[in-house]
Amino acid sequence: MLGDTDIGRPRPRPIIGRIAGAIGIAVEGAMLSFGLAAAGVILILLGIALFFRDPDRFPAKTENVVISGADGKITDIAEVPFPGGEGQLYHRVSVFMSPLNVHVNRAPVGGVVTLVEHTAGEFRAAFRDEASEHNERNMIAMTDAQGRIFAMIQVAGYLARRIVCRLRPHDRIQTGQRIGLIMFGSRVDHFFPSEYRVTVAPGQRVRAGETIIGAFEQ
């Protein structure tokens, strides 16, 4: 399991504290100069800017691994059939994104997109297991250079009301490439073959485009 140096370099310190300090200074100045209403507007604008932040990420230069497609916390790891199919079991690793997480999604593996399928649904709390079957969602299936099949499902949550996906079938993707985002609190389910070893655990925090969540068993 990887720690704070997933790619051989210390992680940058969390920016939330620095951003919170800057917000506090801005709000205090606005209240002194323009009053409570102006401070409220500044808080809303800064909150929106925080949500849409899109930091650069640097995927590991390691072959035969699966990278997290989302920032957040691992909420579930299970053995399930491939979405929409039966038979061979796949690992499913679910990542819940709170409104404070970066919400840009990234490709978990490199290869070719074989399917992009949007399904309308409800907007239940994304961290609940049934959300993957009942909530509005977008499934992306892909194959790597060895022909192995993977999938990633963007799941809308209680607050999330829009899923953005920039991919189309036959697109070629690289590991860690930006592929879309989900508005506000939401979830991403990763599906990869059972020949891979899961390298994360429930409760662990991961970073899109950097944290390895699965490795092929040689």
Image (cartoon, rainbow, N blue to C red):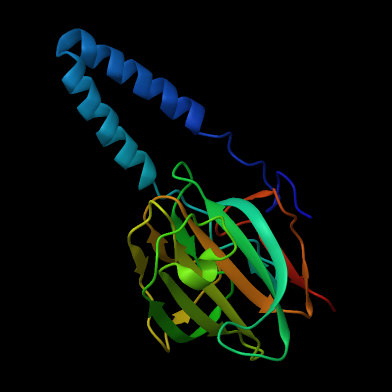
In the rendered view, does 65 fall on the left or right side of 173? right
* Farthest residue, direction left: 34
Q: Position of residue 176 (x, y in %)?
A: 53, 65
Quarter of the picture containing the N terminus is bottom right
Question: From what the image shows, is residue 76 above or below residue 9?
Answer: below
Q: Position of residue 66 (x, y in %)?
A: 66, 69
Q: Nearer the viewer, residue 212 or 48?
A: 48
Quarter of the picture containing the C terminus is bottom right
Q: Position of residue 33 (x, y in %)?
A: 16, 10
* Farthest residue, direction top: 32
In the rendered view, does 77 fall on the left or right side of 137? right
Q: Nearer the viewer, residue 202 or 129?
A: 129
Question: From what the image shows, is residue 46 above or below residue 181?
Answer: above
Residue at coordinates 17% horizontally, 21% vertically from top-left? 37
Residue at coordinates 71% horizontally, 46% vertically from top-left? 5
Q: Position of residue 166 (x, y in %)?
A: 35, 72
Residue 95 sits in quarter: bottom right
Residue 25 sits in quarter: top left
